[in-house]
Image (cartoon, grey):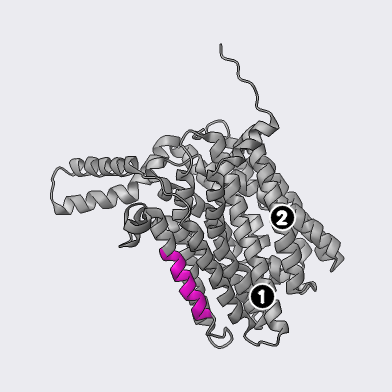
Amino acid sequence: MEIYKKQSLAETFSVYFDRRMIKILLLGAISGFPWVIIGSSLSLWLKEDGLSRSTIGWAGLIFAVYAFNYLWAPIIDRVRIPWLTNKIGHRRGWIVFMQTIILISLIIWSLINPSTNLALVISIGLIIAVASATQDITVDALRIEQIGENEGKSMQAGAAMAVVGWWTGYKLGGVVALTSAELFQNFGFENYWQITFLVLGTIIIACNIGLMFINEPLQTDRSESQKRTDKMIEDKLGVSNLLTKIVAWLAGTVAGPIISFFKKNGFKIALAILAFIFLFKIGEAFLGRMSVIFYKEIGFTKTDIALYSKGLGWLTTVIFTLLGGLFAIRSGVIKAMFVSGVLMASTNLLFSLLAWSGKSELLFAIAVIFDDMAAAFATVAFVAFISMLVDRTYTATQYALLASIGTAGRTTLAASSGSLVDWLNGDWGIFFIITALMVIPSLIFLYMIRHKLKLND
C-alpha cells in the first residue's frame, strides 16, 4: 500500500513559481485587454455621447461573437498564416495577425464620432470582437500547451495565472482607458475618447513585443493524430481522390473535436456539462454589462470608477485568484465551482445595498472587493474545469467550444440587461437581486454530474 503525504500550503503555493506561469500571465493579459475596448470604453463613450441604457445594452451583442468562435476554431487549429507561421510559429502567428486587426480598428475609431456614425462605430466594435474572439482561441490553446497533459496541479495553477493575467489586462487596461479619457477631457479635448483609443493602441503594440518571449511548443503528435483521423474518414468513404481528401479534411477538422468530447464523457453527461457551462456565469454577466452605467448614474466619476472598480478591483482579483487557485488545487475543482457559485450570488446582493443607500465610497469599495473576490474564485475554477476536459489533439477547438458555450449564456442573455433595468423603472436594487438568483440552475446541473466527470488530472 502506498501512503501519500498531503502537501503543505507552502509546497502547494510553490507551483506558482514555475517559469511557465509568467508566460501564461502575459497570455491572459493579451486575452483580457480587448474587453476594455469593447466593454467599459465603448459603453462610456456611447453613454457620454447621449445614448440610452437600452441602446448600450443591445450594443453589447457584439460580445456574442465570443459565443460562436468555436465555429472557426478548427480552422485556427489547422490553417497556417502565410509568412507569420514560418517566422514566429503557428499559435503566435495567429495572435499577431488578430492584434494587428485590433490596432487598425482603434485607429479608425479615433477618426469617427458615434453620434453621427453609430452604425460604423458598432461595426468596428464587431470587428474588434471577432478579432479578439479569434485571438482567444489561440491564446487558450497556447496556454494549455505550456503545461503537460497530466500535470493537474500545474494546470489549475496555470488557470489561476491565466485569470490573473486576464484581469490584469482588463482592470489595468481599464485604469489606463478611463484615466486617459478623464485627463484628455479635463484638458478640454472634445474628442477625448478618440485620443484615448490611440493610447490603447500602444498597449496592443507592447503586447505583441511581449508575445515574442513566449515559446511555442512543437506539436507533432497533434498533427499526426489529426492526419490519422482524416485517413480514417477517407477510408470509410471507400474511394481515394482529391474530393474525398477534401471531404475527409473538412469532416475531421469540424466533427473530430465534437465526436471526441461526446465519446469521452458519454452523451447525457456531455449535455449536462454543456448546460452547466452555459448557465454558470449569467448573473455575473448581467451585473457586469450594466455596472459602469450603474456607477455613473449614482454619481461616481470616471476617475472614481478607475480607482475603485479597476485599480482596487485589480489588486483584489490578483490576490483572490491566486488563493482560488490554491483552493482548487487542495480541495478539487468541483468543490471550487460550488463555492464560487455561492459567492457570486451572495456578493451581487452588496450592489443592491449600494443602490438603495445612494452614493457611498465605502460601500462602493466593499462591493467591488467582494464582487472581484467571487469573480476571481469563479473564473479560476471555471477555466481549470474546462481546461481539464479538453483532448490535446483538439486543444484550440474543444476549449473554444466549451468556453464559447459559457460566453453564449453571458452575452446573448445579458444583452437584455439594460432593458431589464428599464422594465424595473431603474430599480437597481431589484435588478441585482435577480442577478444573484441566476446562478442556481447551473449549480443544480453540476450537482447531478459531480461524480461522473472525467477530468485530466
Q: Residue at x 28, y 41 (%)?
A: 224
From the top left corner, tell me how far across and down residue 336 is, in percent.
Answer: 65, 39
Amino acid under disc 1: Ser
| Residue nearer the viewer, 302 or 435 | 302
Mark 2, Cα crowd under 10 Å, few <14 / some 14-19 / many 20+, is: some
Residue 437 numbered tag: none
From the top left corner, tell me how far across and down residue 241 is, in percent.
Answer: 13, 50
- Image quadrant holding the N terminus, namely top right
Q: Residue at x 81, y 56 (%)?
A: 366
| Residue nearer the viewer, 391 or 341 | 391
Q: For the residue labelled by badge 2, is the local secondary structure a helix, a strand or a loop? A: helix
The image quadrant that residue 358 belongs to is bottom right
The image quadrant that residue 443 belongs to is top right
Q: For the residue labelled by badge 1, is the local secondary structure a helix, a strand or a loop? A: helix
| Main SS of residues in magenta | helix
Amino acid under disc 2: Leu
- Residue assigned mark 2: 315
From the top left corner, tell me how far across and down residue 118 is, in percent.
Answer: 54, 82
Real-space Cα distance between discs 2 and 1?
20 Å
**Left or right: 38 as drawn, with respect to 436:** left
Mark 1, Cα crowd under 10 Å, few <14 / some 14-19 / many 20+, is: many
From the top left corner, tell me how far across and down residue 152 is, in percent.
Answer: 53, 35
